[in-house]
Each structure stands twice: as C-alpha cells, then as structure tokens.
Amino acid sequence: NAGVTQTPKFQVLKTGQSMTLQCAQDMNHNSMYWYRQDPGMGLRLIYYSASEGTTDKGEVPNGYNVSRLNKREFSLRLESAAPSQTSVYFCASLRQGAYEQYFGPGTRLTVT
Amino acid sequence: GENVEQHPSTLSVQEGDSAVIKCTYSDSASNYFPWYKQELGKRPQLIIDIRSNVGEKKDQRIAVTLNKTAKHFSLHITETQPEDSAVYFCAPSTGNQFYFGTGTSLTVIP
C-alpha cells in the first residue's frame, strides 16, 4: 500500500494563477482532509469530506475549493492564488469508525 | 469551534530527563485526544492517543494523561533521547474534525 499520496511535492505560482493539488489514498478510507501548515500555527483544517460525494468547510476555507472525485481521491483547488496561500499543504485520510489520521507527505506551495 | 492551547511552545531538556507538554481544550464534547510528532520537513505521525473513557495510557517511554473535568491532557516522555527532538502537536477531536494545537518544539541536548 502506498498510503496517502500527494502531487506535486513543490510548486511555485504567481499571484492570480490557479492550480489543483491532488491527493489519493489506497486504504479504502471514508474520510479525507486538507490542512495547511504555516510556521508557528500548527495545522489548520481547510476542507474535509466525510464520505464520497460530501464536502464540508473547515476553519480556513476562503480562497479554496475541493472535489471528492471518488472514494480514493480528494483534490484542492486554488482559483486565484495569493501570497497569503504560501504554505505547506497536507492531505489526510481516516477509516470509518476509527480515529487515527494518516497523512500524505505534503505539498510545499509558494505564491510570489 | 474548539479552542486549543499547547504549552510550552519550546522545551529544551538534557538527554535522559523527562519532558511534559500540556494541551488544554474548550469543547466538552471532545472524545479523542491524540499526540502527533513531526520531524523537520516530514508529515505528522501519531505517537499516542487516548479515548475519553480512559485516564492514562502508556507506550514504552511515552504516556498520555487525560483530565476531562479540567479539559486538558498531557504528553509525558521519559528518558529522552536525541531522536525525540521534533515538534509535537495535540489535536483533540469530537469525531469528524481535529483541532491542532500550535505545537511544542522539543530539543533534547546530548
């Protein structure tokens, strides 16, 4: 099992550009999450999906959209990137009825 | 949402000493209390967790204690080693959502 995978690992965008961060898990987990991590801030929840076909806002959803494409994949889209979105983005998944989150390796995004 | 505070924000200990990190939370409905370890440039990894019906859990050199009445739980690391140097996060949860603390940077001095 690959666990949780994320692409790309690194990305540099100019202000106003758009991009999609991809996340996939092969553990048949129901719930998936997108977090951002800024220095000294811990991880903050952007969006989550409790099951295929459902998505909910987290703590910091502004400027982002998500798609739960199927049970395996959960993507995060930045429509018009801003320097404030410079961060490390982590995807995570969770099995139904369990509590342990499994994290992907992260995507380091810089917006100039 | 949940208000989570973690103390201290930085901690330096001599190798072999103990380290304690405390996490306070606000939502009395929280029922799951994990601790994550994150090494530089790596993803967070669960190191120990506790459910709301248990007061203490131990796994070799690490332990977690929970005080639901006072709404706090703590991570205890004994006989610290240089490889324990990392950032530690608490992330209390009510089920679907996890609320991360701002982290404690632990440095173990050889």
Image (spheres, helix red, strand yellow):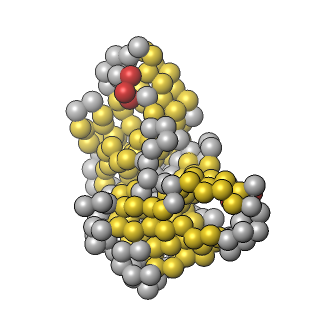
Reply above or below: A56 against A23: below
Q: In which quarter of the image is the C terminus of chain B?
A: top left
User: Where residue A95 appears, x then y in whole percent?
Assistant: 30, 68
Given residues A95 and A79, the one toward you in this image is A79
Q: In this view, does B75 lie to the left or right of B56?
A: right
**Residue B50 is at least partly visible in this image:** yes
Reply above or below: B17 against A86: above
Label total for image:
0
User: Where residue B29 appears, x then y in whole percent?
Assistant: 44, 63
**Residue A84 is at least partly visible in this image:** no
User: Where residue B47 appears, x then y in whole percent?
Assistant: 33, 43
Q: Residue furthest bottom?
A: A53
Q: Residue furthest left?
A: B60
- Answer with the quarter of the image where residue B82 lies: top left
Give me the residue at 30% from left, 60% from top: A2
Give me the residue at 45% from left, 33% from top: B86
Q: Is residue B72 left or right of residue A111?
A: left
Q: In which quarter of the image is the N terminus of chain B?
A: bottom right
User: Where residue A106 appears, x then y in whole percent?
Assistant: 49, 54
- Answer with the quarter of the image where residue B64 lies: top left
